[in-house]
Image: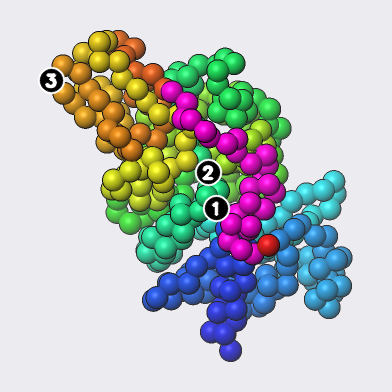
Amino acid sequence: MSEAVYTRLREFMDKLPAGYPETPNGVEIKILKKLWNPEEAELTMQLTNDPEDVSVIAKRVGMDQAELADKLESMAQKGIVYRVRSGDKKLYQAFHFVWGVYEFQVNRLDREFCELMEEYMLYIGGSAMARQTRPMRTVPVESAVGIGKAVAPYNQIRELIKKQKVVSVSHCICRREKGLLDKPCDYPSEICFAFNDFGQFYIDNNMGREITVEECLKLVDKAEEEGLVLNPSNTGEELYGMCCCCACCCPILGLSKPAPRPADIVLSYYQAKIDPDECTACGDCTERCPMDAIAEGDDFAEIIDGRCIGCGLCVSACPVEAISLEPKPNMEAPPKDMRDMMDRIVAERGLA
């Protein structure tokens, strides 16, 4: 009986926008058993993809409202369902696994879970990268493009951050996972951000701590200084999160780097260009590039076709300003907000 409920939960999770694909060896079932008990699994499947008041859910499932409220709040604190606030009310909904439930486990990791996720990410990461609409995109560091009319507003990450009302910072779950698997990373750990409703969820559940916009901007400066790739949610002005990624821990960058053309996998609006007349072949950009996208020559360096993901880290490293970022042609603006992004993914997956 308990095995059947997890099979049904997997099928339910796979029908949520981001999906939860089945694997040949059933590792995804082991993950569900690790996070949900059978009662929680049954209750999760009674929720919808939209936030609802407890009274509405209680009527649908035939449960005492106070008892249900306690159970849902416990599940939200475990990060296996999502909760938003509407005034004094708490609204609950089922939520997709990545990016979502998995990231909500940042303070609940153990080695067994990390081993399962390392295996499963090969499946779920690949399916996410294969879609036309990606959940995240790479934006250039500000020193690479500056601020001006030539830069689309959705790529001016610091200006976007200034518009957010609630900001939380948490530890990078990818780096924590690698650390538990005896592959520690030297990059900063407490440098992942959530905004507004997502930020409040992290703060309420002690997954992250609240910071000011000014503190967030200073941490973004630190991320650029350290050579981390900025990957916000693939939404316009309404950000819900931003990771500061390294290729050694981030599954998306890690899966993209060995590919012949990472630029076809990582969503980005820019690509680097090197001026051979200005380049001194010093090698600084080669060391800083997370995708090995730069080939050193005797007289000047060159961008390898298909490898640049437009992060701009090479631009900020160049001592002679020989590198610039150029907008990619024919790029569409990102989805307006999370609802728009998820609606697009649902349509692409044929779930509409």
What separation in Å lies between label 3 and label 2 (alpha carbons)?
Answer: 37 Å
Residue 334 within the magenta-colored segment of the rendering: yes
Q: In this rendering, which labeled residue sits more in front, label 3 or label 1?
A: 3
Q: What residue is shown with label 2?
A: 136
Q: Nearer the viewer, residue 131 or 3?
A: 131
Q: Which mark is residue 152?
A: none
- Check the image and report above or below for 251 versus 301: below
Q: Which mark is residue 99?
A: 1
The span picked out in magenta is: 326-351
Disc nearer the start of the sequence (3/2): 2
Amino acid type, label 3: Asp
Mark 1, secondary structure of its residue: helix
142 left or right of 253 in image: right
Residue 53 within the magenta-colored segment of the rendering: no
Disc nearer the start of the sequence (2/1): 1
Amino acid type, label 1: Trp
Q: Are marks 2 and 1 in contact (CB under 8 Å)?
A: yes
